[in-house]
Image (cartoon, coloured by chain):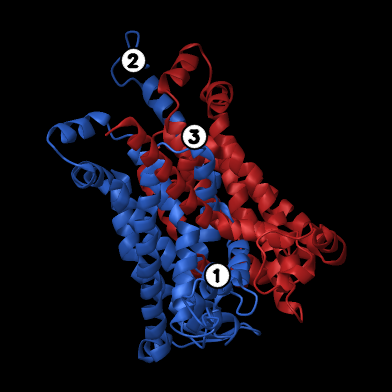
Chain colours: A blue, B red
Amino acid sequence: MFREGPATTASPGKASLDTRYGLLGALLIAPTVLVFCAVIVYPLISAIYLGLFSIYTPTMEGEWVGMDNYRRLLASGEFWRSLLNNVIWTVGTLALQVIFGILVALMLHRNLVFRAFARSLVLFPYFLSTVVAVLVWRWLFNDLYGVLNHLLMWAGIVDMPVDWLGTMPNAMVSLILVGAWKYFPFVVIAVLARLQSIPDELYEAASIDGAGAWGRFVDVTLPQLRDVLIVVVLLRTIWDFKEFDLIYLLTGGGPIIGTQTLPLMVYKEAFALNQMGGASAVAVLMMLIMLLFMILYLSRARD
Amino acid sequence: MSAPARKSRRYLFNLFAWTVVLVIAFPLLWMLLTSIKPQSELFLIPPALLPGEITFEHYRRLLTETPFLTYLKNSAWLAGGTTLVVIVIATLGAHSLVRFSYPGRERLATLVLFTYLLPSVVLVIPLYLLMAGLGLANTLTSLIIAYTTFALPYALWLLRSFMKAIPEDLESAALVDGASRMQAFVDVILPQAMPGIISTAMFTAILAWNEYLYALVLVNSDAARPLTTGVINMLVTSFNIEWSLLMAASVMMSVPLIVVFAFLQRYLTRGFSAGAIKG
């Protein structure tokens, strides 16, 4: 766009303008890069390094132990149990989020009285602080006065109040349900946005070909949703896998370590057992597991 | 299908859909109702849906007899401070990523997205040691610094998508008219990007308002505790849990979110899923 006038070939003037612009661009991004290095890159490298030490949290004194933390972890039942819990939680809550999210999105896509208000009500849990979500659900789950137990007993589904959070497998089921309630709006909004951009002609063509409602859903809607669903599933896998707040606040990883996932194990090692080195090692292992999904997502997001 | 049949089908669908919506919203409705019921009505068996009498006693007690207002003030400072720092840096950075070319630019953009996915539990231990080393333990400043770890990548990514949507011709026209690139940025790009900047600021403020883990680890005094850890502290330190008080606190914590939520309707898709949907 600056190639007007006689000097169209790479003249010194143009080269210096490009260089100057490049420099200005670098200058504008410099604060970002500096902050990134200070609060993300340095702590990240530091976490990997700390994993090679044995550090007592209150005094922060440590000694080099090499790979001992990792050897100890991989030989411990607790690490594998936490990893298994992490997978159960992630797969369980994600499956509910996706299924429920698609259904509700289809519902909200159709004509509905006060549709905008209905959408707001459905989307709001995602906006809410996890602290608030957990407080509300703990009150709903309350064994004596919780409204959930009363409802179930009134409907004749159970005879005795259910201990939702204190026994297994109830605690895991409750976690998965609350996680699904809190995070399914993410699927709803992504699917809803995509539904609105599917051309009507596709449905008309399918109808002419004799497809019923179910046929149109399978042949038109699902293939059109495929790409957005892949990205949503990858993102939510990453986010659900690293979830700390919801699990820590709802069950604290209990009963015993029944619902303890890897992020909770990191916290426990560092601040309850005072083993910062061991905690960093858990964090690094957790990140390695997540890396696969991150790379998959990044490769999709780039194109 | 006959017209009456179609009409009754529509009616049934509406009934069904609104039942689903109300079931989803029920926990929040229950929170609101619990917060305005007299304490004695909480323990009715079976529980009554609507309060027999409405009281704002719990809100009064929350504001006068608990440190709630201190937490609220801290949360407001945190959300405001984090947003200010992050928006200034991210606006410049996003402009650079969208409108300038230099080696490593694409790699940097990918790195931003990568850090947006990093788990906080990995960074929290080194940040804890760093803050202790800098003498910032138990301060709001330490939390603002920690919050940039997730708020900056988020804001940068969201702003990048907003700024990409601004037509390139606008800046070119200003440059042809003799403006420098910084003048073009201030006079042309910034006004165009303003709705994007404002909504990004609001989304960022919400992230900071709702944050829990860093607040749990980095701050251990009521003077610097935000609402999230503060309200949980009220739960764990009380002898018998006062649910009406906690529900009142939950409502108060959510009111700013409702206001912002209403304001952001147009941008929800973008803000929810920065990176998930191409903007």
x 52%, y 78%: residue? A164
User: Residue A92 vs residue B124: left or right?
Assistant: left
Which chain letter goes with mark 1?
Answer: A
Picture residue at 42% right of the left edge, 31% below the top: A19
Mark 3–mark 1 Cα distance, whole angstroms, equals 54 Å
The amino acid type, in three-letter code, at marker 2 is Arg
Q: Which residue appears farthest toward the right when viewing the image?
A: B64
Q: Residue at x 53, y 79 (%)?
A: A165
Circles 3 and 1 on the same chain: no
Q: Secondary structure at mark 3?
A: helix
Q: Nearer the viewer, mark 2 or mark 3?
A: 3
Q: Which x, y percent locates residue B185?
A: 54, 26
- State whether residue B68 appears in this view: yes
Q: Position of residue B68 (x, y in %)?
A: 79, 62
Mark closer to the observer (3, 1): 1
Q: Quadrant of residue A117?
A: top right
Q: Which residue is mark 1?
A: A151
Amino acid at circle 3: His
**x, y percent for residue A301:** 33, 47
Distance Cα–Cα, label 1 vs label 2: 75 Å
The numbered mark, 1 or 2, whose residue comes first in the sequence reads 2
Q: Residue at x 68, y 70 (%)?
A: B232
Which chain letter matches label 2? A
Against A106, residue A138 (above or below) is below
Please tell me the numbered disc located at residue B95.
3
Label 1 packing within 10 angstroms: few (<14), some (14-19), many (20+): some
- What quarter of the picture does the C terminus of chain B occupy? top left
User: Which residue is more in the foreground, A274 or B19?
Assistant: B19
Q: Which residue corresponds to mark 2?
A: A3
**Mark 1 is on which residue type?**
Leu
